[in-house]
Image: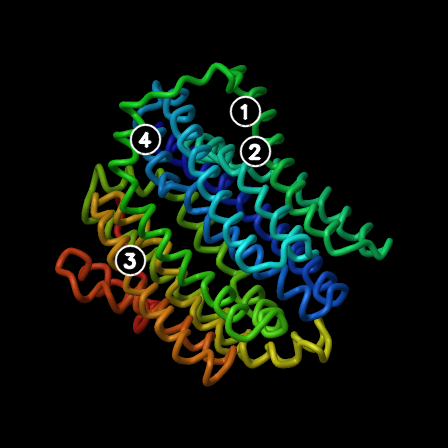
Amino acid sequence: MKLLNLSKTKIIYLKNTAWLLFEKLFRMGIVLGINVLLARYLGVSDFGFLAYSLSLLSTVMIFTHLGLAGVVIKELVLKKYESNLILATVFYLKLVGAILGFFILIIVDFTTESIGSINFYILLIISLSIFFKPFSVIESYFLANVEAKYISISTTISLIITTLLKVIFMILSLNFIWIAFTYLIENFLIALNLLLIYFNRTKIFIGKWNFSLSLSKELLSKSWMIMLGSFFATIYLKSDQIMIKWILGNQEVGIYAVASSLSEVWYFLPSIIVTSLFPKIIEYRESNQEFFYLKFQQLLNILFIIALSIAIIVTFISKDVILFLYGSQYAESGIILSIHIWAGLFIFMREAFSKWIIMEDLLHFSIITHGLGMLLNIGLNLLLIPNYGIIGAAIATIVSYAMASYISLLFFKKTRIIFYMMTKAIFFPFYMRRKNA
């Protein structure tokens, strides 16, 4: 019976991972394809401004994330009887964050773009997407209950509809503003689909959700350090395109964005692997510490092997891929891609570390490590972009990612164990010691 139950548990988690993998792979293919069409349709400059606008949105999106994703999943796994209260409280916290984030985007729009210009309205339209992000709390509910297929269904439907709209708008040769509207529509549809599926599954209408001030304080006390760390992380993840725009202009952003998008498209893989296994990892830690760290080492090894394989392959084919997909106007993106792709080695392993600090209640290291990465990234960008252009930005990305996700872990006693485990993964990735639970 025990073996049968274990087998069923493994099947559930495999199915959960499969749904996440299918949705992300499908999304990766669709987004890659439509971005190729958009890059050719809009041209380097307009495509650069689109990438810049989306980077700004991603930067302020931290006010809707609030560092709560991992914390909420953990709370929902351990306190199933309070799930409605948890979801309601987090939703309203995210809504307040969305209002704050939108206010910041409006200030940037009014101060950096000419009022009434096309670019002004494009940034405004894309900024409105932030108001649909609070509904992402429903995703945490499905992840905690190992029901990732509902997330996949909602995002896939939304993506298909808005992709068709983009294609239709390009065929009709419509204005850039119409393209911007599709990003707003996509976020609206994702929120709507999540709501409908949640209501169908639980028969609970979110209008009846009740906010708990005491619970909000408790959750924020656990997540504020992750939020601040995530803010730092978002800055050094997205500041390159923002700083390139402000220093060099839209043209260079377009060239850099094409390369970074092909490089970052792979970042969904560690997220899927770690997020899907997170509930099981929590159980391992609670029952058997030795077995937990054995499995954690194997996880780091797998993440590094995948990242290294991708980096090697992409480095050799980067130039040909860029020319084939985007054309000669984006030829310079090839060298940027061959450099930027190596940042993935650290991003992949960082995903596991991010979950580890939640389980070990060491959230302050999210702030410290991301803070070091952010400062180094901004400093290097200020130094390298004026002198070496977008190649300098790509180099700054690798160095800052390495600092935040690997090197900085050596500086502190409590994180040193993960540094050593990552080092083993880097130098001995194919050594997979096994032990029965």
Q: Is residue 135 above or below residue 181?
A: above
Q: Quick one: label 1 or label 2, which is nearer the N terminus?
A: 2
Question: In the image, is residue 155 above or below residue 344?
Answer: above
Residue type, label 3: Gln
Residue 198 image label: 1
Classify residue 156 as left or right of residue 72.
Answer: right
Q: In the figure, is residue 75 to the left or right of 306? A: left
Measured in 3D between alpha carbons, the distance from the residue under mark 1 to the one under mark 4, in whole angstroms, is 18 Å
Secondary structure type for disc 3: helix
Q: Give the mark nearest the N terminus, 1 or 4.
A: 4
Q: Residues within 10 Å of mark 2 (few under 14, many from 20)?
A: many
* Label drawn at residue 86: none
Q: CA distance from mark 4 to mark 3?
A: 25 Å
Residue 150 bears which disc, if any?
Answer: 2
Residue type at tag 4: Glu
Instruction: Give the image location of residue 146, x and y in percent.
Output: 45, 34
State the residue at coordinates (45%, 85%): 387
Residue that badge 3 annotates: 297
Q: Position of residue 12 (x, y in %)?
A: 46, 35
Q: Residue furthest right?
A: 172
- Three-letter amino acid code at disc 2? Tyr
Mark 4 nearby-residue class (10 Å; few <14, some 14–19, many ≥20): some
Residue identifier under label 4: 75
Q: Observer-nearest residue: 374 or 421? A: 374
Task: Select label 1 or label 2 by which is in front.
Answer: 1
Tags 4 and 2 touching, CB below 8 Å = no
